[in-house]
Amino acid sequence: MTSLPRKPSRVKLGLVIDLDICVGCQACAVNCKEWNTSGHSAPLTDINPYGAGQKGVWYNRIHSFEAVDQETGDSQTINFPKSCLHCEDAPCVTVCPTGASYKRSEDGIVLVNGDICIGCKLCSWACPYGAREYDEIEGVMKKCTLCVDKIYNETLSPSSRVPACVATCPVGARHFGDLGDPHSEISNLVKARGGFALMPEQGTEPVNRYLPPRPKQHQKSTDQSPRSLEHKDTSTDGAGLLARWVDKVLSA
Amino acid sequence: MHPAKSVIFFTTGSGAGYGMLIWLAVLSLLGLQPADSIYGLVAFGIAFALVVGGLISSTFHLGHPERALRALSQWRSSWLSREGIAAIVTFAPTGLFALAWVFLNENQSYAVGLGIIGAAMSLITVYCTSMIYGSLKTIPAWFTKWTSIAYITFALMTGAVLLWFVAVIFGLPQANIIGLIALVFVGLGFIIKLKYWHTVDHAPATSTAESATGLGKLGKIALVEAPHSEDNYLLQEMGFRIARKHATKLRKIALVLGFIIPFVLIALAIYGFPQFQLLIAGVAVFSGIVGIVTERWLFFAEAKHVVTLYYGESAI
């Protein structure tokens, strides 16, 4: 049934991604592919994997953005992993004509039933975040399952029952938990760090949250900043007596 | 958005077919249609060929066309599902209307009643088609009431032009009245397309690279590196951009071929050269088809999807 659950699920499983410490190593994307190519929506098809024009289904994509402060000129690079946000008001679910796309009432995970999906791609049009990719070989839509086949898997040790991307992140930039519980560890993390949702104006009420980069200590615009060599440097700070004398003579 | 040929033919073809079905019923109600078997066969034949052809064509882009019937199950939430159901239900009254007309030479009394029910259902179906696109908030160029207004107007316009063409072929005495209706709707279509473009071109951005990343507080956001080295599904489907380069020229082509030439030719056929009516009508129809297909191609190709904000667009 592609109508959303009548009552929002109490449990809202999701991810919190820390943009302050993500180094953009792509390990989350690789381990996601590794787990899910034999998981719930397997396989994650690749076309021409070793040649030109390679194409394939990935649940996780890591973009890199630059933020430039228009006043000071300060800039920083932000590595930006993006996967399904398991929206509360998921438009990909309501547009689905077949009932293949659904949101679980018990934990809020958004899934695709590949056995009844007709591959009309409308869900991918409805999603603002690009979370859904079409599998050309299988003819159905695929998306992040939040590793539903891993997080409840009792044959795994309790500490392994987290999504593959979270388990593998070498810097601990990814957190998994219940964002519906205001006192859960990750809810507290979101509160403490000012976590935010992506494109709230689209009205999808994403569950996943992102933690902003912490303010930098050394910016070009502050006194503590190291000298920037790209600009003409006219100061003689730190130069010796002889150098300052030569500078004075030459500047005359 | 990638303009799939199957979807362009589906929306233009089924729109024109439903438009014809609507006019066949409305004009019968007004007593402006002969209850002639051959004329009915040709007119309904073209209308149903367009509708059925469009619907079949729309299944071509599916990954699993054999599961298409499943698409009828989610009418509670999905406009695509509603469209499918409306299209199938519409076949009942319009089909019976056609049968009564062709085999019983009856297009009045109970037959026209069925026809009008069919016309109303046809309008609902076209509205559902338009809402498949008009309900997508992620594509601001479609998320406007003008999408539905345009789809309905173009269905009535193309239907009227085609029915006029058939009437001219059969030399119906009512041909000029149908031509006049076509003339009015071509003019109306022209104004509505201009209004649609004006609305879309002047709408403020709904989302930006800053809101997409949530990093606006840090400054202006620009993509440094894409997540993949080659185009993926998202870029092929939502990142279509060939049209933008020629958008202005293509808009002019759509306006001239789709509206201005048919308008002038229909007027000429009625008031100027009635002796060449058939030839003029044929050219008007051909020009109109090329124009409306261009218009629909632009409707898809020009529309930007907010996911491209993650791939270098700055505001949509």
Image (cartoon, grey):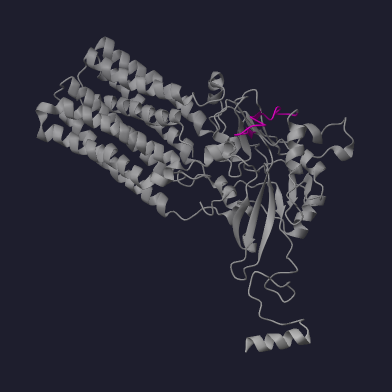
**Left-right relation of B141 to A72:** left
Q: Is residue A212 found inside the magenta-colored segment of the image? A: no
Q: Eyeballing the image, is B89 above or below B160?
A: above
Q: Nearer the viewer, residue B30 or A96?
A: A96
| Percent coordinates x, y for residue B137 in the rendering | 52, 45
Camera-side residue of B127 and A123: A123
On screen, residue A132 above or below B52:
below
Quadrant for residue A251, please give it: bottom right
Which residue appears at 32% of the width and 25% of the height?
B21
Is B55 on the left or on the right of B270, as rendered? right
Residue shown at 73% from the left, 49% from the top: A24
Which of the 4 image quarters holds residue A176? top right
Per the picture, the main secondary structure of the magenta-coloured stretch is loop
Q: Position of residue B198 (x, y in %)?
A: 37, 51
The residue stretch that appears in magenta? A39-56
Q: Nearer the viewer, residue B138 or A242?
A: A242
Instruction: Name the residue rendered at 53%, 40% in the picture.
Output: B238
Considering only vertical position in the picture, is B173 above or below A72? above
Q: Is residue B65 left or right of residue A28?
A: left
